[in-house]
Image: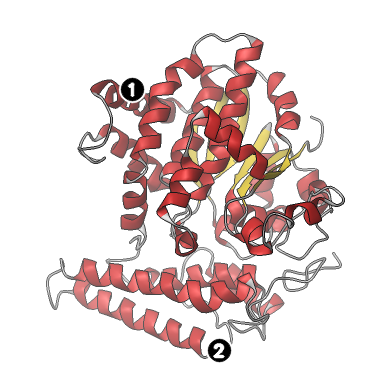
Amino acid sequence: MSYTPNSPPYPAYRATVKDSFAWDSTVRRWPIIVEGVVEDVKEALEKKKKDSQEYNEGHTILQGIERLKTEMKQNELLRPIQDSKTDTETWNLHLKTYFPSSTWLNGTWLFNECYLYRRLHECFAMTTYWRDYDPFLNQKNATFRSSYSSVFSLARKMPEFIQPLDKEQWTHVYHELVQVCLWGNATDLSLLTNMTVEDIKRLQAIEKDRLKEQQKFIVVDHTDQLLKQLETMHDGCIEFVLDNSGFELFVDMIFADWLIQTKTVSKVILNCKPIPWFVSDVMPKDVQILIDSCLDRNFFPQDADHTNEDVVALETLAKRWEQYIENGTLVVRSHDFWCSGLPYCYLKSEAPALYETMQQSDLVIFKGDLNFRKLVFCCDWPVTTPFVEAIGKDMADFTSVLSLRTNKADAMVGLKEGQEKEIEEVATYNEWRCSGKYAVIQYSKGYTK
């Protein structure tokens, strides 16, 4: 390879460029997220017995986070990870090999952002009572609870989606669900500092006319290429590399359920993060938490505008999903690689067994912005670079790959000549690249089995 994680094919985004999105994330957004963790731990400590080991460990965690905040503020070197988790040695090897003199500002934005969450986890991993604590869980649950309108609307519509359909009807439902699955990615808690509640509601809207309106904001749309594959698939196997828990996970499950019920696939694998990650990312436990929430009649607001039939429809979905897990139709798994700081072109070399296993699936759907950034090396490609080129040879030869991403960072590929200029006649750079209001659906066919 002529490139490294710290020296990608084109210039990496770094926080050294003042007023860039990477700079804004590092200087403004990350401290807000870290402070949110502090407040969550303090709230949890109020329920612990004073002077107990658990209580004292909580204060040790807070002290560790304060040191982390100081390192960030003073732009110190990225130090080695100090816990003894299964990925510690790998993280430290990457730091030593690729980022030996990197600081919080001059390292690549991609690696540094991943490093931030790994360092936060270190504060908990070095304790006894808090090692599995998720400081983002309350935020995840609260955001899913606020999505009740779209949740019940989808549950109510699902029986129509899975009834026997002719080809035209099946294709119509396909297009609708791909868009629902795409815009569900708007609920990213690590970026809510940039987005209003009304923005979230707009992007979660699932009515047909709203989806049609949203379509003009999809700047690269390979929906028809994916359709050609799914039309010929029967009892296949697909995988999701998941992004956000809550509503986005819910719509991912809806799409997976539809593919199962229509016999397009007979197995779906959900790849989750092994540790709390980017605030709202899905961990294995979050899948069961979502199912349990859908079965809990007291979870969503009691004054919400839904009927008893809506509640029953949601429970029917959740019970079916539980059955999928029990019989192996739905598999939930995690791997340390998903919480590394490297782009996905290193999947084959860093996690060869995972690469080979996933390569046997018919399609891998990468959800969200971070997965897209990792797919395309999070660097400043010419925007007309083909997606299949940007993901690198190993991922192009992998299997069929689909990226469903609302744009929340600079990285962009796959545009047509002149398209960037057309977009920027109606939207600012940050609006169409970083706000989550625009999106891409990008597909690579992969090798032919």
- Cα gap from disc 2 to disc 1, whole angstroms: 53 Å
Residue 93 can be seen, yes or no: no
Residue type at tag 2: Glu
Residue at horizontal 46 percent and vertical 71 percent from the top: 84
Decide if residue 91 is on the left or right side of residue 290.
Answer: right
Q: Residue at x 42, y 73 (%)?
A: 32
Q: Position of residue 259 (x, y in %)?
A: 56, 24
Question: Which three-letter amino acid code belongs to the residue tagged 1?
Answer: Ala
Label 1: which secondary element: helix
- Relative depth, front residue between 345 and 80: 345
Residue occupying image coordinates x 47% and y 66%:
85
Query: Which of 368 and 88 lies nearest the eye of the viewer?
Result: 368
- Local crowd at mark 1 within 10 Å, few (<14), some, or many (≥20)? many
Quadrant of the drawing holding the C terminus: top right
Location of mark 2 (residue): 76
**Horizontal side of residue 246 vs 351, given as left or right:** left
Residue 305 image point, x, y percent: 27, 33
**Farthest front residue in view:** 425
x and y, in percent, of residue 12 in the image = 73, 71
Callout count: 2
Q: Is residue 96 visible in the rendered structure shown here?
A: yes
The secondary structure type at the circle numbered 2 is loop
Residue 167's place in the image compared with 46, above or below, is: above
**Pair 2/1: label in front:** 1
Which x, y percent locates residue 67?
Answer: 41, 86
Q: Which mark is residue 216?
A: none
Residue at position x 80%, y 56% from top? 421
For residue 151, above or below residue 229: below
Quadrant of the image containing the N terminus: bottom right
Which tag, 2 or 1, sits closer to the chain's start? Answer: 2
Residue identifier under label 1: 313
